[in-house]
Image (tube, rainbow, N blue to C red):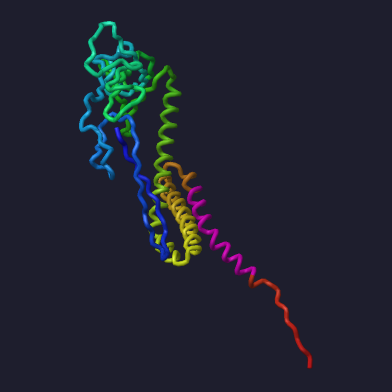
Amino acid sequence: QWAEKKTKKSVKKTGGSKTTITTYSYNKKWSPVVINSDKFQESYGHDNPDVMKYESSTWTAAKVTLGAFNLPSSEVLRINTWTDTHVSDSNNTTLLSGVKPSGTGYYVGENPSSPQVGDIRVTFSVVLPTDITIVAQQSEGTFVPFVTNNGGSIDLLKTGVYGKDFMFDAAKNENKAATWLIRIIGICVMYCGVSMVLDPIVVLSDVLPFLGNIAEIGVSLISWVVAIITSFVVIAVAWVFYRPIVAIVLFAVSGAVLAVPFFLKKKGSKSVSGEPTESTELLV
């Protein structure tokens, strides 16, 4: 199918205004869903089919077991060791018109080596029997999440054979990674907010191009500093009761960064007032 790609570029004008130039490009790609070409900026010559002749489907085994236990569907879906499988033609199945074998599946179109818009390729993947490790609660021949005293739940699953220590350590590491990702996103959002608040300074400075570039760099640096300090303070407040030492360190770092400009200003004023003076007297 045809796919549209938009590329935006901002160009500054004299006086501080900005113009956004949008460029559209089109290329062919395989897609499991219909791409609506009616919404393209340039739909002429980039028409896609209205419907998929064959749609993707997933079939799940009615009964999947781990030893003597039946796995619930929620855990079966988490086993994602998909591998391509070859379609057997031992039954001498008669193919529909326009369908031909291709690789491990089938191809609907003229030439698989030269795909055209509207062609379809059909492949099959399967999850074969494999070893898995589960940390959950046994209940009536199956598994359910274990509810902890604080209201949380434990329901871990990994492909392979592992010990309990590895499973819990892996879960902790995944939780830490997700937490840091949220923190980084929060810092970036804070940076964008501060930048938008200070953006009028850049616009006013753009009257002189060189001054606008300097102001843009300065605003960007200030925005990052404010975003990082504010985020550290928020994290520290959240950790006051759970990790007080870490909270104190974050408060100290934030305070030190805030104190640096005042310290430099004070030091500069002292150095000026402390300079030796020289006087000359003229005798008459």
Q: Is residue 185 above or below residue 280?
A: above
The quarter of the picture where residue 140 lies is: top left
Residue 33, how many percent across, how many down? 26, 31
Residue reaching furthest bottom? 284
Judged by its main secondary structure, the magenta piece is helix
Question: Which residues make up the magenta segment?
Answer: 249-271
Q: Is residue 48 above or below residue 21?
A: above
State left or right for residue 206 relative to residue 103.
right
Residue 186, how many percent across, how many down? 39, 46
Residue closer to the observer: 186 or 125: 125
Residue 40, how many percent across, how many down? 27, 42
Which residue is found at the position 25% from the left and 23% from the top? 57
State left or right for residue 249 relative to residue 43.
right
Name the quadrant of the N terminus. top left
Which residue is found at the position 48% from the left and 48% from the top? 250
Q: Is residue 26 magenta?
A: no
Name the quadrant of the C terminus. bottom right
State left or right for residue 61 relative to residue 262.
left
Q: Is residue 252 magenta?
A: yes
Res 31 seen here: yes
Res 198 seen here: no
Residue 105, how many percent across, how many down? 31, 17
Which residue is found at the position 31% from the left and 37% from the top? 3
State left or right for residue 261 relative to residue 276.
left
